[in-house]
Amino acid sequence: MQNLPVLYIGNKNYSSWSLRAWLGLRVAGVAFEEKLVPLRSEEWHAKAPVFSPTAKVPAYFDGTKTIWEALGILEYIADSQPDTMLWPLDIDVRAIARAVSLEMHGGFGPLRSSMPMNCRKSLPGLGRNKGVDKDITRITEIFKMCRTQYGQGGDFLFGHFSIADAMFAPVITRFKTYGVSLDPIGNAYMETILALPEMKEWYADAATEEWVIDDAEVK
């Protein structure tokens, strides 16, 4: 029996990058073995440099090579398993999907730092400042553009679930935690992501975790 590829992830309560890769693979129907290594634990410090060249999560080992970075992992799956349809088929639409995914990958620093991912908490109103509000406005614009211009045929940013949805899923968990409401289009899209069975599974697992990272907790 052939061994499954392994996806190394961190705590489901905190690890936004782990969620991106995990959700993309799960919704696409890619079989893999999940190995969770608690962030900043002794196990983490011992194992992370072994399973990832950057000592970070996520990392994906397919039996012959390791792919790191969530976007790198999902791009590899999209290329090697095109039946997953992780990118839109139309080249022009695919370019837009890649652009917003890369904007998410490299941007929105104020929101990330002021509203860290924490699936277990409900902290409405915390973390808001001018930089965060600017990020929220831009994300609202992205959701509206994608849903109205490219979202026909489905409930996701580009109709069918894509890498773009996986990239923005952790932001939606932040909006849920910190009580951020968008416009009607954005709120409907948020509900679509949160209603995914895979997202419900992630939240259920996060709720059972006992690890607490003090400096990742907004008080």
Image (cartoon, helix red, strand yellow):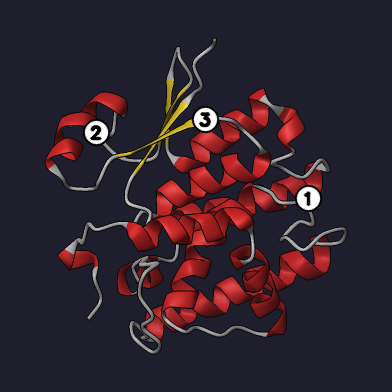
Q: Is residue 92 above or below residue 45?
A: below
Q: Which residue is mark 3?
A: 32
Where residue 47 sits, quadrant-wise, is: top left
Amino acid under disc 2: Ala
Q: Which quadrant holds residue 193?
A: bottom right
Residue neighbourhood size for the residue with mark 2, other residues' Cα within 10 Å, grouped as few (<14), some (14–19), many (≥20): many
114, above or below 41, in the image: below
The residue carrying pointer 1 sits among few (fewer than 14), some (14 to 19) or many (20 or more) residues within 10 Å by Cα, namely some
Task: Write down the residue under mark 2.
Answer: 48
Residue name at image x 65 percent, y 23 percent: 80
Q: Which residue is mark 1?
A: 93
Q: Residue drawn 63% across and 53% down?
A: 164
Q: Residue at the spot x=48%, y=52% of the render? A: 105
The one nearer the camera, 82 or 44, is 44
Badge 3 amino acid: Phe
Nearest to the observer: residue 154 or residue 150: 154
Q: Secondary structure at mark 3?
A: loop
21 or 205: nearer the viewer: 205
